Amino acid sequence: MSKKRGHFETAVIHEGYDSKNMLGSLTPPIFQTSTYTFETAEQGERRFAGEEDGYIYSRLGNPTVRILEDRIAVLENGEKGLAFGSGMAAVSAVLVALTKANDHIVCSSGLYGCTFGLLSMMKEKYNMKTDYIDMKTKAELRAAIRPETAVIYVETPINPTMRLVDLEMVAEVAKEHDIPVVVDNTFSTPYLQRPLELGCDVVIHSATKYIGGHGDVIAGLAVGKQSFIDLVARTTLKDMGGVISPFDAWLLLRGLKTLPVRLDRHCDNAEKIVEKLKKHHNIAHIYYPGDKHNPDFAIMEKQMKRGGGVISFEIKGDKKCAQKLLNRLAFMKIAVSLGDAETLIEHPATMTHAVIPAETRGEMGISDQLIRLSVGLEAWQDIWSDLEQALNQI
Ligand code: LCS
């Protein structure tokens, strides 16, 4: 991996790629190949034995994918990156690599529904227990750790409640017990937050979201120490097989070039919408880390550049009112996912987090009145006027 070149805004465009090595092609080529030829049988033997560098088969490595992996490693300030066919492929490959039957995981109280589903499946199949805790104090975290705790798994901001976890605090406690901290950095991206710089061990992304940024790719990424990422590459990625396609890697390289520009606009728009929402009579609560009045604002200032592009809010009313709000929108799209140019709105309790039992959802703060808004890149005035007219009707 090459050394970080210039500022973040420069690295997203140039890192990991040198056009001199690719016939002067400004944009990285798409190596759309499944396999690679060997000059001789002995060369094939050397490559499989790891005695000679070079490509073998695209599940084990691909030049387009490698550029992406090198770039994300630099952006997250980690030793090595790895790309996957989805965010869930990244989450599962990392978690399976770090755990064995009967282990214990400490997890933030609230996380993406399918990650919760994966942890539930691991409990059923391998007797692995997970405790979901607020992670607000060192004492609370220390009390949750057991001899068989293998991983501390954190989402921050948490999907969909937008609560934050103090990553430096978590990393400090984890070090006392020598437990790796895995952080899902999907909502922030390395532009807003870099968990490895705060002492955490592995970063995961659903690159489907802000990193791709255009709603046209499903992909995942992980970054960490070279020894750990190499282990994942040759075990849970290679053998479970959740690899990314070269074309999707190319789409992410393209998306990354505009990440800082897009995220600044997402944040600008979100801040404007929060101010408007605060004054609306049908809003009960707003959850946005970039808001001065948010209880997690101090953590935001400590570890994030800005509050991000997602706002969650509770409306006054019930589930029917929440659904009515979505149905009354004119141009805004009802859809899961987030981080796209288009503003997307969804109802977590019945969509992204429906898999979580109602009681646990309640404990995590995912009420029937909660709405998640991924503020897009449209003019904020248009986003607000659509939202306002729908809110007026519930
Ligand atoms: N981690 C987080 C925080 C996510 O929000 C998601 C997907 C994943 C991991 C999984 O990534 P994927 O496999 O989909 O690339 N979150 C979604 C959401 O909130 N709405 O639709 C998908």
Image (cartoon, rainbow, N blue to C red):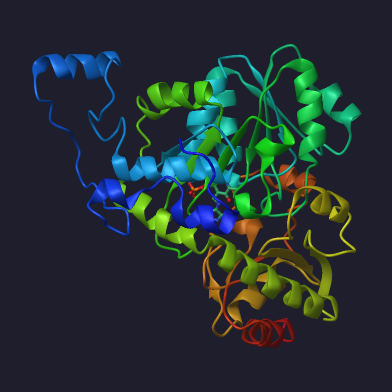
Vertical relation: 95 (above or below) 277: above
Residue drawn at point x = 64 percent, y = 44 percent? 356
Residue drawn at point x = 82 percent, y = 39 percent? 134
Quadrant of the rendered image containing residue 194: top right
Asked whether residue 374 appears in the rendered view, the answer is no
Vertical relation: 213 (above or below) 366: below
Q: Quadrant of the N terminus?
A: top left
Residue 109 at x, y = what percent? 75, 40
Q: Is residue 221 left or right of residue 142?
A: left
Residue 358 at x, y = what percent? 70, 47
Residue 10 at x, y = what percent? 53, 57
Residue drawn at point x = 73 percent, y = 42 percent? 360
Vertical relation: 196 (above or below) 287: above
Q: Quadrant of the C terminus?
A: bottom right
Residue drawn at point x = 46 percent, y = 48 percent? 15
Which residue is farthest left? 40
